[in-house]
Image: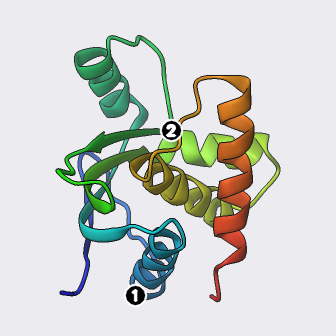
Amino acid sequence: MPEALIHFFTEDITYQLRQRTEIRSWLNTIAKKEKYSILELNYIFCSDEYLLQMNKDFLNHDYYTDVITFDNSEFKGEIEGDIFISIDRVRDNAKLQQTTLKDELHRVLAHGLLHLTGYKDKTKVESTLMRTKEDTSLALRTF
């Protein structure tokens, strides 16, 4: 099995993700626990305004969000996708949740990946399960 391709990009902001190697390893661990393998995964860090426009253009939603996930996978069990993350929203949510920027960012990184393994968060039940999966994912970190 070839090495998973996990890329990190920025769109309209300057942002430098720390611990990229450790994060890639951790994301692969999450995928494996869900019985998925990552073929190619792109994380794109951007601003609130950029993600708001994407939310309007692609999802017909007119509100700010912290993450939007696009699943490009062809087969179950394989992950190919693009995950857009608003660093503005992550910063604000970290303050609201009284957590660190690092922990909130990692929660959102995991959240997008979990969407690609089939978890949803539209209903109360789905949201509760997603939060549990996020917590489980954060607990897998060794860095």
Provide residue 8's location: percent of width, then percent of height: 29, 66
Q: Residue furthest right?
A: 98
Towards the viewer: 91 or 77: 77
Q: Earlier in the sequence, mark 1 or mark 2?
A: 1
Residue at 48%, 24% in the rendered image = 64
Tell me the amino acid under the disc marked 1: Thr
Tell me the amino acid under the disc marked 2: Asp
Residue at 24%, 21% in the rendered image = 58
Q: Which residue is mark 1?
A: 21
Q: Is residue 52 above or below residue 137?
A: above
Q: Secondary structure at mark 1?
A: helix
Mark 1 burial class by Cα count in 10 Å: few <14, some 14-19, many 20+: few
Give residue 128's mark: none
Distance from label 1 to label 2 (Cα)?
23 Å
Towards the viewer: 1 or 128: 1
Provide residue 2's location: percent of width, then percent of height: 18, 87
Position of 126 compared to 78: left or right?
right
Provide residue 90's location: percent of width, then percent of height: 57, 47
